[in-house]
Amino acid sequence: MIQKHDNKIKLLETFDNTYPGRNYLITHQTNEFTSVCPKTGQPDFGTIVISYIANKKCVELKSLKYYLQSFRNDGIFYENVVNRILDDLVYILKPKWMEVKGIFTTRGGIHSTVLASNGKKP
Amino acid sequence: MIQKHDNKIKLLETFDNTYPGRNYLITHQTNEFTSVCPKTGQPDFGTIVISYIANKKCVELKSLKYYLQSFRNDGIFYENVVNRILDDLVYILKPKWMEVKGIFTTRGGIHSTVLASNGKKP
Amino acid sequence: MIQKHDNKIKLLETFDNTYPGRNYLITHQTNEFTSVCPKTGQPDFGTIVISYIANKKCVELKSLKYYLQSFRNDGIFYENVVNRILDDLVYILKPKWMEVKGIFTTRGGIHSTVLASNGKKP
Amino acid sequence: MIQKHDNKIKLLETFDNTYPGRNYLITHQTNEFTSVCPKTGQPDFGTIVISYIANKKCVELKSLKYYLQSFRNDGIFYENVVNRILDDLVYILKPKWMEVKGIFTTRGGIHSTVLASNGKKP
Amino acid sequence: MIQKHDNKIKLLETFDNTYPGRNYLITHQTNEFTSVCPKTGQPDFGTIVISYIANKKCVELKSLKYYLQSFRNDGIFYENVVNRILDDLVYILKPKWMEVKGIFTTRGGIHSTVLASNGKKP
Amino acid sequence: MIQKHDNKIKLLETFDNTYPGRNYLITHQTNEFTSVCPKTGQPDFGTIVISYIANKKCVELKSLKYYLQSFRNDGIFYENVVNRILDDLVYILKPKWMEVKGIFTTRGGIHSTVLASNGKKP
Amino acid sequence: MIQKHDNKIKLLETFDNTYPGRNYLITHQTNEFTSVCPKTGQPDFGTIVISYIANKKCVELKSLKYYLQSFRNDGIFYENVVNRILDDLVYILKPKWMEVKGIFTTRGGIHSTVLASNGKKP
Amino acid sequence: MIQKHDNKIKLLETFDNTYPGRNYLITHQTNEFTSVCPKTGQPDFGTIVISYIANKKCVELKSLKYYLQSFRNDGIFYENVVNRILDDLVYILKPKWMEVKGIFTTRGGIHSTVLASNGKKP
Amino acid sequence: MIQKHDNKIKLLETFDNTYPGRNYLITHQTNEFTSVCPKTGQPDFGTIVISYIANKKCVELKSLKYYLQSFRNDGIFYENVVNRILDDLVYILKPKWMEVKGIFTTRGGIHSTVLASNGKKP
Amino acid sequence: MIQKHDNKIKLLETFDNTYPGRNYLITHQTNEFTSVCPKTGQPDFGTIVISYIANKKCVELKSLKYYLQSFRNDGIFYENVVNRILDDLVYILKPKWMEVKGIFTTRGGIHSTVLASNGKKP
């Protein structure tokens, strides 16, 4: 299921993990995620939380911001937002373990969350 | 104990799970659930939280909203609300795992919660 | 603008104010108000807060509950919900002052509040 | 409307205000008030907040506790609980200003508050 | 240690569990529990949380309310309140698992909690 | 300073105020406002709160949603967002009083709020 | 009513107000106040909030800490704690306005607050 | 490391556990703990949480209050406060399991917590 | 009392107020303020809230950030931090009204706030 | 990966663990951590939480404060802040287990956390 999403992936930059021998946890969270509902064309809003245990590479923060902003005008379902961010970051970072959580705002009185992970938490 | 509740079930629509090979968690929560107490005829209010790991199918959000609204004028006990929503969604989605939680407002100074699940969380 | 809404008003009962000479404040709040959107037919949910300084009569609590429940299947706009509850209670109680606030749940990402009052707070 | 409620009032003790020349505010709050509904015989629960600016006398705390506990098995309406506590304390303390607030737990989905005062806040 | 407390137990009513084949969790919580300290005669206040997995029977909510109210004027220690409620409900319901938690208000600056359970959580 | 912003303004629809003789307060709040910083091209996020006392017209909710969404890809400063929404709505509704508040997310460690009003609160 | 409490007062130090021409508000709050109940000998605990508009002098923070600690083993009523701190600080600082608030922990289920001020807030 | 601290220990009283055959959890928490820093002589403040599963004896609440108050003017480090309370209570109660947690207020911008236990939680 | 603090002031940039005819409120808040205590050399931390009604000029956000950061290694008392920021911004912006609030972290168990303003709020 | 960072490490002092035979948990938390971003030169702010089970030595609190303050003007990435504090404290204390967590303030709308540990929690 791992695919290259070339345009978005090109936005992501990495730097070398200074402590590759230690399994430590890095978490990045943004409350400013927005995309567009592919069915209604209406904007969607949410929080994205990315947690991982790095292998050789860490994601550079500014490039992660641009990557996440690139969804701004994409028509994409909640489930696919979370799984695609996971696929793209796993493809670039090859982490020991990664989890992506999307917490989306209420639509029609229903509030949805999607949580996906890759690898086994050491 | 799995039964078809045909009228309500017909309201539910599904779409194909794009990532069937990955065990990821989907949660839908509404704070706008209401039904009627079968004993007193008084309205009941609560929050319903549905969590599942999809197999081949995901539940479509708008149809889920209509399904949950269909309880509005039904006379049904708290315990049965939660177990029936679980049965109906399991029947339609055949998920790898599903959990339904109902958190009901205070009646006579007592606040009740019911939590039921189907399958083993992978 | 004061009108009799006879069917609903008949649900309201009163009892004599034991302290008519004192201007004291009574507040009743329910988080369990629901009605129907007259445009979409979708259920609306909200909190209603009624505050008043009684004259000769106070509203009986159980009858107030039945009165508020009587909106359950009515198609009515937020603005009218609040103004009508105010009109009905003013008609029945003739309070020295009354205020009704409706705090409605989010629709299309917008959360609305309506606040109306009658008389001058002593 | 000021009446002596002799049995309860005998429970209240006072001590001399050490700073009678200064208008300062004293507040006592208990979350442990309970009485009985005169209609249904069911127990009622609430928070009582007493605020006052003393004249020559302050209420002794332990006696206030016993006074408030004396309502435990009384059948009395919310409105009367608050007005009577105000009357009794005004009768005993002759304060420059006093306010009593009762915040009662939810009954039938409705949460009620009663607020009464005596004198003009200096 | 299981004993019949006949007077209180007679207040409890049950109804048949509609889903005896499923291990689902039911929780009832009241913030309106009060009893009397057997040492000082002073009223005690607390929250009682009852969680269980039903076997063949569920406890009827109104009868549970009356049962809990029956402690109102009993002189009983915190530890015994929790263990006795557990014993009585286990005796009546024979649940697969039950847990009772009492969270009591501050006395002498100390806030106490007691948590007891019966059976093994499936 | 009142100007027509024709493209955006065309999105706004109104309905007749049913209670023009009463000064009652209407509030609409969205946590899903986004625009673009005209200096850096980076997306901005915020909450917009619109409060008003209607004259002859009220703003229709769905049209308000579309109007607020129309800022999504506009380059505009915080101060201008708030003042322009105020100008547009005042132009369309001629309210007795209106206030617009924008609460924007943190940028460079600084969190900003802008609050503007038109008319005198009756 | 202003009295010198020489031993305690000697602990307080001041420094010159750099902005005597401007009426600005200074607030110092400690959650670590403790004294002893003169009746029971039991320790009392509370929060003290001191707000003032300085004239020519400001209170030095470390000396204020020592001053407040000097109550640690004093037997003194809540009302007197607050009024005495106010008297002592007014005596030393001659502020344009000062307010002292004491918020004390629960005793016998009752939580008390005392609020005293000196001068008129400019 | 278990030592007798005779003076303090003499303050502790016990009563017989009515349910010695059941492993149930008792928790006592006070937010009113204070001692003195042995290095600076400054007062320390904190919250102490004691949790245990009783064997044959339970600690009597009032005696526990006096025991905890006996630290008021002792010079003792945070680590020793927690370990000594644990040692003293284990010595007196011989519980199946006990845990003591001390949560101390901020000193020099650093907030400290110490958590010690004895025995294995059944 | 208005003085030029030339080095810091040079960091501040302004832009023209687009709505000079309207009295609207702008608030900027940072939780990331730090300076150094002139007495102990220890770092101080706090939140700064700047509110103003602009005249002809508004402060540019990025320059405000650099200005506030310039205090990082300055030895300066809490009272002077707030008054100086007020003086500098008033000197540069000539606002109709401005208020600066500093909320500083706990030192020796005491938490301090300073609030100063310039002009009369229109 | 354990390295000596001699200048900083010299700031750390230790004292003997009085209870080396017991595995108890010590936590120190400061909300006043600041360093400098090595890329932009901008100040970073965060909370550092250090938890450990001591072996023979405990870290002295005042020296820990000076050690953490020594990062104030260092240019260092989030990941390295956390790993280096862990390395330095492990080098000095040889704890049975230690965990360091850094929770950093929002930058570019992204909030980051880093969590590293050494040894196995007993």
Image (cartoon, coloured by chain):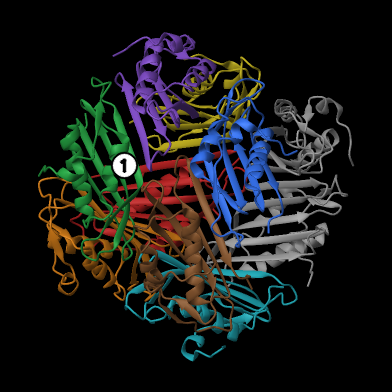
Chain colours: A yellow, B purple, C blue, D brown, E green, G cyan, H orange, J red
Q: Residues within 10 Å of mark 1 (few under 14, many from 20)?
A: some
Q: Is residue D90 above or below residue H101?
A: below
Q: Foreground residue, E69 or G47?
A: E69
Q: Quadrant of the C terminus of chain C?
A: bottom right
Residue J69 seen in the figure: no
Left or right: residue B98 versus residue C45 is left
Image position, residue J52 (x, y; %): 31, 51
The answer for which chain carries disc 1 is E
Residue lying at 23% horizontally and 22% vertically, measured from the top left: E20
Q: Foreground residue, A73 or D6?
A: D6
Image position, residue B62 (x, y; %): 54, 17
Residue D48 seen in the figure: yes
Q: Quadrant of residue C2?
A: top right
* Amino acid at circle 1: Lys
| Element carrying mark 1 | helix
Q: Foreground residue, J99 or C49?
A: C49
Q: Quadrant of residue C6?
A: top right
Image position, residue C11 (x, y; %): 55, 35
Q: Quadrant of residue B25?
A: top left
Left or right: residue H26 versus residue G19 is left
Q: Quadrant of the N terminus of chain C?
A: top right
Residue identified by numbered label 1: E65
Left or right: residue E68 versus residue J6 is left
Numbered-mark total: 1
Q: Is residue A97 above or below residue E47?
A: above
Image position, residue E68 (x, y; %): 28, 45
